[in-house]
Amino acid sequence: MATLPFVKMQGLGNDFIVIDDVSGGWAKIVTPEFARKICDRRFGVGADQILWLRQAHESGLDVRMEILNSDGSVAEMCGNGIRAVALYLQDHGARRASTYQIETLAGVKSVKLAGRLVTVDMGAPLLGAQGEEIAVVSTEGESAKFQFFEVGMGNPHAVIFVPGDVDAFPVEKWGPMIEKHPRFPKRTNVEFVQVESRRAIRVRVWERG
C-alpha cells in the first residue's frame, strides 16, 4: 500500500491538508471520495480543505494549487489556503523566496512573506447584486428572508449584515440553506457581518463545501 505524505496547516483557524504532488504520481488517489474520507474529523485527519500542489501550467510560476473541499467539491480560491501554501513552499519547496507566484482556478496570485507573516494580493473584488433578497427554509421548516451583497474574490461570496450580536446568530442553521440556494448555481460562501463601528466589523463565515 502506498504511503501518501502530507502536512497539516491552518490559517486563522481555517485548516488544511497540504499534499505536495509537484513531481506527479498522486492523481489517481487525490479524488473527491478521498477528500471526503481524509477531511472527516472523526475517521480521517480532519480539515476544511485539501490543498493539492501540482506542477504549474506556465513556466515562471512556482506551483499550481488545486483545492478540494471537505465534501469533495472544488474551490477556485482560498485566501488562508494560499497563504499556507506559500509558507509551505518557503519551508519545503524547491526555492526559498520572499515572493511566490501561485496558479489557481481564479488566476495567478502573488504571495509575499516577511518572516512568518504571509500576505496575498487577492485582486480587486467583483461586485454583483447589492441588496438582493432571497427566501430560505431551514431543515426544521422555519422560513426567513435575507438581504445579501454579492462579492467575487475568485470564488463567490454572499455578505449578509445581521442585527445584534453576530456571535449569537445561528450561522449553522442558515448558512447551509443560503449556500445551496438556487440563486447561487455554484453555491456560495456566506459571510454574516456585525458592524461595530465605522472602523470595526465582526464576521462569521459559513464556508462553501
Image: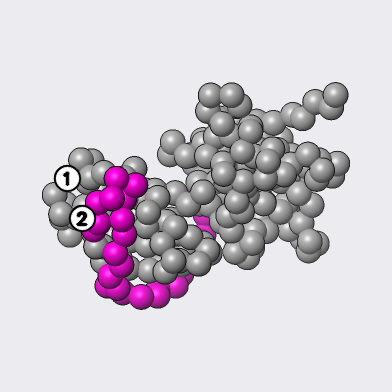
Region rendered in magenta? 119-144
For label 1, the crowd category at 10 Å Cα-Cα, with few meaning under 14, some 14 to 19 and many 20 or more, is: few
Location of residue 53 in the rendering, given as x and y in whole percent from the top left corner? 71, 46
Location of residue 41 in the rendering, given as x and y in whole percent from the top left corner? 53, 28
Location of residue 71 in the rendering, given as x and y in whole percent from the top left corner? 57, 44
Q: Badge 1 is on which residue? A: 165
Q: Was residue 55 drawn as part of the magenta stretch in this picture?
A: no
Q: What secondary structure is the stretch in magenta mostly built from?
A: strand
Q: Badge 2 is on which residue? A: 162
User: Looking at the image, which residue is at 67% across and 51% down?
Assistant: 66
Let me know if residue 124 appears in the view. Answer: yes
Please tell me whether mark 2 sits on a helix, a strand or a loop: loop
Image quadrant in which you'd find residue 37 = top right
The amino acid type found where label 1 is placed reads: Asp
Please give left or right for residue 94 compared with residue 90 in the image: right
Let me know if residue 99 appears in the view. Answer: no
